């Protein structure tokens, strides 16, 4: 009997590994390099094993999207729970979560991969737009001002800067930028 038949099956761990590998390939080589063969080989699983979890490339990218959105929503909820001021709470949480992504290299790498995929895949852009639209509707009473939108768009700019590593922002300037944006939501 082979070793694979004796080891305990861990489907969630394998799914996560496949998503991680797809994200790494997308961030390092571009989304075009995310093929089922490349992901299976890099993850050390058979193509059939990958197809058991994800029946194609788009379901694999959807799996990455779902995982990251769950983590993102959880981080947003934690930030919002810790913020006693209702007005602008969602925008402050969004800014803080986005600003802290680069401090978690694994999660940041996954977001880089997903962002690269979103640039090429209309389906993923539509899913992100639906997420944003839903949050805008959820927080219309507290975060519908132009100022709140300005802060979230600035957060997106910071996120893009972090993902592309296209600009160096020293830690003091970065902290001052985040603090200034937070202050905008409180005025």
Image (spheres, rainbow, N blue to C red):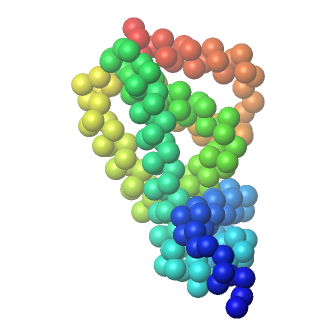
Please give the name of the residue rendered at 72% of the width and 88% of the height, measured from the top-left corner: 2
Instruction: Give the x, y percent position of residue 38.
Output: 69, 75
Instruction: Give the x, y percent position of residue 104.
Output: 66, 39
- Location of residue 158 (image quadrant): top right
Is residue 160 shown above or below 144? below
Is residue 33 shown above or below 128? below
Is residue 76 shown above or below 12? above
Please give the name of the residue rendered at 47% of the width and 70% of the height, measured from the top-left corner: 59
Q: Could one spot residue 34 in this view of the protein?
A: yes
Does residue 141 appear to the left or right of 20 in the view shown?
Answer: left
Residue at the extreme top: 187
Instruction: Give the x, y percent position of residue 124.
Output: 45, 59
Q: Nearer the viewer, residue 137 or 79?
A: 79
Q: Could one spot residue 150 in this view of the protein?
A: no
* Quadrant where the image shows the N terminus: bottom right
* Quadrant where the image shows the C terminus: top left
Please give the name of the residue rendered at 73% of the width and 21% of the height, measured from the top-left corner: 171
Please give the name of the residue rendered at 63% of the width and 69% of the height, measured from the top-left corner: 34
Q: Nearer the viewer, residue 167 or 82?
A: 82
Residue at the extreme bottom: 1
- Location of residue 179 (image quadrant): top right
Instruction: Give the x, y percent position of residue 128.
Output: 42, 50
């Amino acid at each position: 009997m082979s070793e694979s038949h004796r080891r305990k099956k861990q489907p969630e761990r394998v799914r996560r590994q496949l998503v991680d590998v797809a994200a790494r390939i997308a961030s390092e080589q571009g989304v075009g390099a995310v093929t089922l063969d490349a992901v299976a080989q890099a993850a050390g699983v058979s193509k059939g094993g990958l197809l058991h979890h994800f029946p194609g490339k788009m379901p694999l990218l959807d799996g990455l999207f779902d995982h990251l959105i769950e983590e993102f929503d959880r981080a947003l909820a934690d930030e919002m729970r810790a913020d006693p001021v209702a007005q602008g709470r969602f925008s402050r949480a969004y800014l803080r979560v986005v600003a802290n992504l680069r401090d978690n290299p694994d999660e940041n790498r996954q977001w880089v991969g997903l962002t690269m995929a979103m640039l090429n895949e209309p389906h993923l852009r539509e899913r992100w737009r639906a997420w944003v639209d839903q949050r805008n509707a959820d927080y219309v009473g507290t975060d519908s001002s132009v100022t709140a939108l300005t802060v979230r768009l600035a957060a997106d700019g910071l996120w893009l800067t972090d993902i592309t590593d296209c600009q160096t922002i020293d830690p003091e300037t970065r902290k001052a930028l985040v603090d200034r944006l937070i202050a905008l939501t409180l005025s």
